Image (cartoon, rainbow, N blue to C red):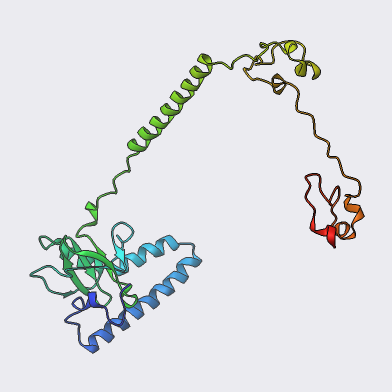
Amino acid sequence: MANPTNPSDLEGLLEERPEAAPRRWGAARYAALAGLLGLAALALAKAGSLAKLRGATGELLGLESMSDCFKVGMFYTNPHKMMGTERMMEETAVMCQQRCSQVGGCAHFTFWPDGGCLLSGPEATLKATPFQFSEAVTGPPDCRFVEEPEAVSTWGADAALGGVQQAGEKVAEVKEKVAEVAPPSPGVNGTACSAYPACMMMGMNQGDCCPNADKVSLGCCSGFPPPIQQVKMVPGSECSSFPACVMLNVTGACCPTATGTRLGCCGM
């Protein structure tokens, strides 16, 4: 919001203020009205009629149409009033709205807390008021003709989603066709499991393995796995023979290792 101590956008909005006495009278009137509304709220709340209270409050303040088209804490500026119009004093926001409806070209009204009524054209810009003017009310000349927000069309999103789905289906079709056109090549000894000693050793001696019925080549089609190389330790190279290596919890060959590397703990 604008700076309350220097509201540049409001310099012209409250021009021609009433004298101090009338302004104090207006504040007292609103205070009395607020007190009456508070008492009414308590009475109606006890009776379970809060909905009626809201309607009565809106009627008293002239804001019965607020929920439909009035905006509170907002004002129109740049320019803040139409050419040829002046700031007038009105009792309620509804009366200010009625004045706007009677002036040709009036697109919005702003009703200020002190009763000031300003009319603005379609070129005016809607802004938020500083805190001390948060009770200002603005709206169109007639709430009956407020346009409903246009329904958001989802045609573009639906079309895009449909395109993505179609593309996904096409990709799946292409993958299926590629799988059909280019099946896995048979192994070097054909597809039968019995043609591969490694598959026979694993107990698969019937059917196809390379590839199988699911067009998957099993690991045994590549032969037996290479034997695990056993590491030979040179006598005297055991880590357990070196206290520093034992403290480091190193096991196996350390001094040197199977690859010929001598660890640092060997010389400690």
| 20 w.r.t. 189: above or below | below
Q: Nearer the viewer, residue 179 or 143?
A: 179
Q: Nearer the viewer, residue 170 or 24?
A: 170
Q: Nearer the viewer, residue 205 or 5?
A: 205
Q: What residue appears at the point 49 percent right and 62 percent down from the top-left corner?
A: 48
The residue furthest left is: 84
In the rendered view of the protein, which quadrant contains the C terminus?
bottom right
Which of the 4 image quarters holds residue 245?
bottom right
Percent position (x, y) of residue 265? 83, 59
User: Relative to residue 3, is residue 237 drawn left or right?
Assistant: right
Q: Nearer the viewer, residue 33 or 69?
A: 69
User: Relative to residue 245, is residue 14 drawn left or right?
Assistant: left
Percent position (x, y) of residue 252? 86, 47
Percent position (x, y) of residue 115? 23, 75
Q: How many marks?
A: 0
User: Relative to residue 29, is residue 170 drawn left or right?
Assistant: right
Q: What residue appears at the point 39 percent right and 63 percent down from the top-left corner?
A: 54
Which of the 4 image quarters holds residue 244?
bottom right
In the rendered view of the protein, which quadrant contains the N terminus?
bottom left
| 67 w.r.t. 190: above or below | below
Percent position (x, y) of residue 104? 10, 60
| 187 w.r.t. 72: above or below | above
